[in-house]
Every structure is written in structure tokens, then in C-alpha cells.
Amino acid sequence: MHNVTLIPGDGIGPEITGAVRAVIDAAGVKIRWDEQQVGQRALEMYGNPLPDHVIESIRANKVALKGPVTTHVAKGFKSINVTLRQTFDLYANIRPVKTLPGINCLFKDVDMVIFRENTEDLYVGIENVIDDERVEAIKVITRNASRRIAEKAFEYARLHGRKKVTAIHKANIMKKSDGLFLEEVRKVAEKHEEIMYEELIVDNACMQLVQKPSKFDVIVTENLYGDIISDLCAGLVGGLGLVPGINRGEEYTIFEAVHGSAPDIAGKNIANPLALTLSAVEMLKHLGEHKAAESIQKAVEDLLRQGKHLTPDLGGCSTTHEMTKELCNLIS
Ligand code: NAD
């Protein structure tokens, strides 16, 4: 029996976390879920969008599966997603982007992994109002955070037989901050002569990603570029409904999809649960449940190959429930 903190989140979060629980049950893995509310719901229930007991639950379990949480635009409380990553020092946001079978998308041979620094950059949230006409936002880049995300990316490349790491930056303009990031990545690259290393300016990288994504293998980048590039790359392989994510630190790990709370489709029973399902596959591997992880991964691929039970984002007309039911059938 594993103990895992479950954060359903909001928007489509409760629908897709419910689906993933059913899939994990079908795979026969026993998990004691410690369900916790954050965000607007927690604010209403406890007067705090990230209550202490949620932090304590993650601290005790060390592993969490998290649905998306809405962050209001230009107002409201600080992003719960960012706060969790900073609180637990989940410095590596790892996002595998791979073409899956049966998906009708432009590229058939995408297979890359994005390593996004997850704790600093403009996401430190330091914004100062200078006067009524001017506001400044502070971008923080440190040697330590740059080095450890680079180490994670190269270590992953070495362990998984990946050939190349690409550092994505804007050091032509942000010479000091992105310059420091690159300095540290280069030092790590020098220790891994067997792995090819290249650097690309972020705008050029975006152009090359949409023209020839198969030339990318492992990407290492800062927080903001990584956030934007992840959604761009999801679009290359069929959309946000298919790309999983891992927030990893030394002690704690939170598994969540790349996508957000999708308020435009929330409550309609049409959200695609596969991105969170694939995040849960990564969680099961982390928990040592390799057989179950393999059988869920295979069921996802079989379901996509069949192409009969797809949610609208994938061109189908099935509901979240129908897709989940079929996924469970394919597992058992
Ligand atoms: P989004 O990722 O929620 O949605 C973008 C588009 O993709 C929408 O059209 C949506 O319907 C679609 N989509 C996303 N996930 C889908 C799924 N599983 N199935 C089918 N379609 C899906 O991005 P947004 O609309 O810009 O953001 C909405 C909210 O989510 C914002 O408050 C944002 O801050 C938050 N957000 C949270 C996280 C997180 O919790 N980690 C990540 C990103 C955004």
C-alpha cells in the first residue's frame, strides 16, 4: 500500500483525477489517497488557498498526484502551482513530449524531454510598482539552480542513452542572467563529453521546434522559456491532453500534466484524462510499480491506436467517462 497526496485541483481537475484513480484501481495498485483541496476551494473552506495541512500531507507522503489549479490573471492569490514547486524545492520540471500512435498530428517522430528550471526566473514573483506609469518584475537566476537543472538533464541523457542536450536561452539580450545560466550549463556539459551539446536562442529554438522537432532530444532551459516551449511542443504531438509532467526535487515529487484547469471545458465530461494518466504512469514507476505502469502505458497506446474512444480534443466524440471506461477495460 502506497500513501499518496491527491490534489484534485479545480476546473477539469476533479474529472481527470477521478479518471486516473479508476485507471490505477484497474491496474491493481493499492494506494491510500490523502485527498487535499487547494486554490479557490481551500480559500473558501479554510481561509487559505494553500493550507498548512496540505503542505504537511505532501511532506509526510513525499509523493503527490496533482490536478491543475486555476490562477487568476492579473489579480488574486499567488499561483499555488508555483508556490508548491518553491516550497518543496521541486527544481526540475520534466516533460516528455513524444508522438503517440494513432494521433493525427503534423509530426510522427517527436521524442524529446524538456527539463525546465522550476524555482526561479521571473516566477519568483517579485514585482514592484515604481509609480503609476511603471512596474518592474525581477528575474532571478542563480548558479546553484542553473547547475542542478543542467545536471539533471545531462544525467537523464546519460542514463537513457540520449544523444544531445540543447540549452535554450536569451543571453544575447539578458547577458548577465541568461549568461550565468549558460555558464553553469556549459560547465556541466564539459563533464559529459559523450553527449552532444548545443545552444539555441529561444526565438530561433521556437522556429526550429515547429519546423523540425525530431532534431531535438533533451532540452534544458529556464522557467519561463520552459513553460512556453512545453505548450508549443504539446501542440506538435496532438495537444495538451497528451503531455505528462513531473516536478522533481531531492526529497519530494509532484506529478501533474502540463495543461491547466481548462475552464472552457470544465464540468462538461469531455476533458482528456490521458496527460494526467501518463503523469500517473511516471508516478507508478517512481513508486516501483513498473508492471502496472507498463500495462497502463500500453492501454493508453492501444486506446489511441483503436481511435474509437477519443475525447473531442483528439478529434473524437467520447466523454471523459467513456474514454476512462475503455482504458480500464484495456488494462484488465
Ligand atoms: P489550459 O492548459 O487550461 O487550456 C488551454 C487549452 O487546452 C484550452 O482550450 C483547454 O480546453 C485545452 N485543454 C487543456 N487540457 C485539456 C485536456 N486535458 N483535455 C482537453 N482539452 C484540454 O490553459 P489556460 O486556459 O491558459 O489556463 C487555464 C488556467 O489553468 C489558468 O488559471 C492557468 O493559470 C492555469 N494553469 C494551471 C496549471 C497547473 O495547475 N499546473 C498549468 C497551466 C495553467
Image (spheres, rainbow, N blue to C red):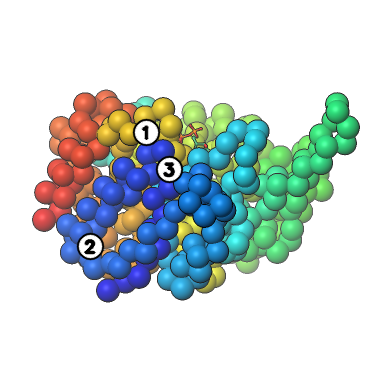
Q: Ligand 1: does it lie within 8 Å of the C-beta at label 1?
A: no
Q: What amino acid does circle 3 point to?
A: Asp
Q: Type of residue at label 2? A: Ala
Of the two numbered discs 1 and 3 on the same chain, state the one appearing first in sequence: 3
Count of marks overlaid on the render: 3
> Is the residue marked by circle 3 packed among few (<14), some (14-19), or many (20+) residues within 10 Å?
many
Query: Label 1 amino acid?
Result: Ala
Query: Which residue corresponds to mark 2?
Result: 292
Label pair 1/2, CB-CB below 8 angstroms: no
The N terminus lies in quadrant: bottom left
- What separation in Å lies between label 2 and label 3 (alpha carbons)? 27 Å
> 250 left or right of 308?
right
- Classify mark 2 as within 8 Å of ligand 1 or not, answering yes or no: no
Numbered circle sitting on residue 266: 1
Q: Could you tell me which secondary element the residue under label 2 belongs to?
A: helix
**Quarter of image, res 107:** top left
Q: Which sits earlier in the primary sequence, circle 1 or circle 2?
A: 1
Between 180 and 272, the one lying in front of the other is 272
Q: Locate residue 316 relative to residue 13 in the image: left or right.
A: left
Q: Name the mark nearer the viewer: 2 or 3.
A: 3
209 versus 287 height, above or below: above
Residue 36 seen from this side: yes
Q: Are marks 1 and 3 in contact (CB under 8 Å)?
A: yes
Location of mark 3 (residue): 10
**Vertical comparison of 294 with 316: above or below:** below
Query: N-terminal of the two: label 2 or label 3?
Result: 3
